[in-house]
Amino acid sequence: MAEQVLVLVGTRKGAFIMESAAARRDWTVRGPYLEGQNVMNMAFDARTGTLFAAVGDPWFGSRIHRSTDLGHTWDEAGSSLAFPVDSGSKLERIWNVTPGRAAEPGVLYAGVEPAALFKSTDDGHTWTYIESLSQHPSRAEWQPGAGGLILHTIVLDPDDLDRIYVAISAAGVFRTTDGGATWHTANRGTRADFMPGEEASYPEYGQCVHKVVLNPSEPRRL
C-alpha cells in the first residue's frame, strides 16, 4: 500500500484533513467534520489507526471524539472526563489529546483548562484525574496566559514509560520520571523576560511556554 501523508487541522469551524502521497506534491482537503465546533487538537493513534479530536463546544461543553475511518465519521470517545467534585475545579475546555505508546495499549492522555492532566486506560471511555500534578507546590502561583491557564502539550518519552513532560501556559514545563506519582519543574535556562527583575528572567516556573517537542534522534532533549 502506498504511503499516505495526513495533516490534521483543528479550527473554530471544525476539523479538516489534508491528504497527500509521500512526495507531498498534491494535496486534497476533506472537511469540515464536527462542523461548527472548536476543535482544539487532533491526534492520530498509530497503534490502531484511530483519529482523536479534542472539541470545545460553547453549548455542550468539551468532549473527545474519535474516528476509526480516517475522519469520515465520528463518535464520542467518552463523557466522563471531569474533575472530581471535591477538587474545587470545573472543566472549561479540553486542549490536548495524546495517544499512549505502543507498549501501553488503550492509554490516552488529555490536557485541560484549568491546567490539569487526565489519563484513560480504555481508549477514552473513562478518565482518571492525575491529581499529583495539581498538587505541585507551585500550583497556587500558576497564572493564565492570553488563552487561559491551559495544559496544552503532552510529550511522552518513547523509551521510558515513566517519563512524561507537560507544558502549561503560563506555568512552564513539568516532568515526571515515576509515571506521574511526582512532578518536577523542567525550566532551567528558559528565559521569561516578561517577568520583572533580572533574577526573574530565569525563574524555576512561570514561563508562558507555547509548545515543546522531543528531538527524535535524542529523545531526552526537548
Image: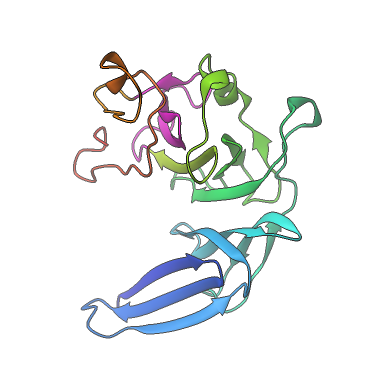
Q: Position of residue 41 (x, y in %)?
A: 50, 57
Q: Position of residue 43 (x, y in %)?
A: 47, 58
Out of 51 and 211, give the one closest to the viewer. 211
Is 162 left or right of 15, judged from the image as shown? left
Q: Residue furthest right?
A: 85
Q: Is residue 55 above or below residue 182?
A: below
Out of 142 and 105, give the one closest to the viewer. 142
Which quarter of the rendered picture does the C terminus lie within? top left
Q: Which stretch appears magenta?
A: 157-186
Q: How many marks?
A: 0
Is 157 left or right of 63, judged from the image as shown? left
Q: Position of residue 18 (x, y in %)?
A: 39, 77
In the rendered image, residue 181 lying in the magenta stretch gets the answer yes
Q: Is residue 112 above or below residue 198?
A: below
Q: Residue furthest front?
A: 196
In the rendered image, residue 8 lying in the magenta stretch gets the answer no
Out of 215 and 32, give the one closest to the viewer. 32
Examine the image and state in which quarter residue 87 appears.
top right
Q: Position of residue 108 (x, y in %)?
A: 55, 46
Q: Is residue 171 above or below residue 113?
A: above
Out of 124 and 175, give the one closest to the viewer. 175
Q: Is residue 1 visible?
A: no
Q: Is residue 113 visible?
A: yes
Q: Residue at x 33, y 42 (%)?
A: 212
Q: Residue at x 58, y 22 (%)?
A: 132
